[in-house]
Image (cartoon, helix red, strand yellow):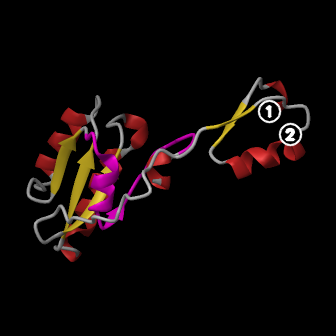
Amino acid sequence: TYRLADMLAVQTEGGAAKVPALFPGLKRVGVVANPVPAAVGLNHKRHGAGRKVLLSLGRLSSEKQVDRIVDAFAAAAGQFDQWELHLYGEGPQEPALRAQIDALQLQERVFIKGRTSEPWQVMAGADAFVMASEYDWFPNALLE
């Protein structure tokens, strides 16, 4: 609980200003600002060769449940033939996801893109974002 914490990190100065009233006795508050540049999205470039892009960005691990995203996309793909799914990230589930994509015959619609050094540009070029994490303490990818 917060009463046992040495410090609380929040994302804004406004949030930091509210901490003393919310958590009396907490002596230290730090601000970790959102690192997304303000100009992101101004140069919106489509990434999908005329198709709409559904984006998932994150570690390819079991708790992120990317396999469920692929299953859901497969279930809806016939009704949304103008969409493709781009999966950005790396992790231990990648081989299983590739096999799943092959088994569902989605090689022309679902793409594992690997790690990106420009996540905000990738997000700016997508039409929609999806995540299915079993748990996530604070989903920065969703906020961004």
Q: Which residue is mark 1?
A: 2
- The residue type indicated by label 1 comes to Tyr
Q: Residue 66 at x, y = what percent? A: 33, 46
Determine which of the numbered discs, if any, sits on residue 102 in the image: none
Dividing the image into 4 quarters, which one contains the N terminus?
top right
Residue 119 falls left or right of residue 4: left
Q: Residue at x 77, y 23 (%)?
A: 6
Q: Residue 119 at x, y = what percent? A: 32, 47
Q: Residue at x 49, y 46 (%)?
A: 140
Q: Nearer the viewer, residue 12 or 125?
A: 12
Region in magenta? 116-138
Q: Nearer the viewer, residue 95 or 40?
A: 40
Q: Nearer the viewer, residue 56 or 92?
A: 56
Residue lying at the far bottom of the rendered structure: 79
Secondary structure mostly seen in magenta is loop
Snapshot quadrant of residue 58: top left
Q: Residue 107 at x, y = what percent? A: 9, 53
Q: Are marks 1 and 2 in contact (CB under 8 Å)?
A: yes
Up/down of 8 relative to 16, above or below: above
Marks 1 and 2 sit apart, C-alpha to C-alpha, by 7 Å
Residue 24 falls left or right of residue 116: right
Q: Which residue is mark 2?
A: 23
Residue 35 falls left or right of residue 137: left
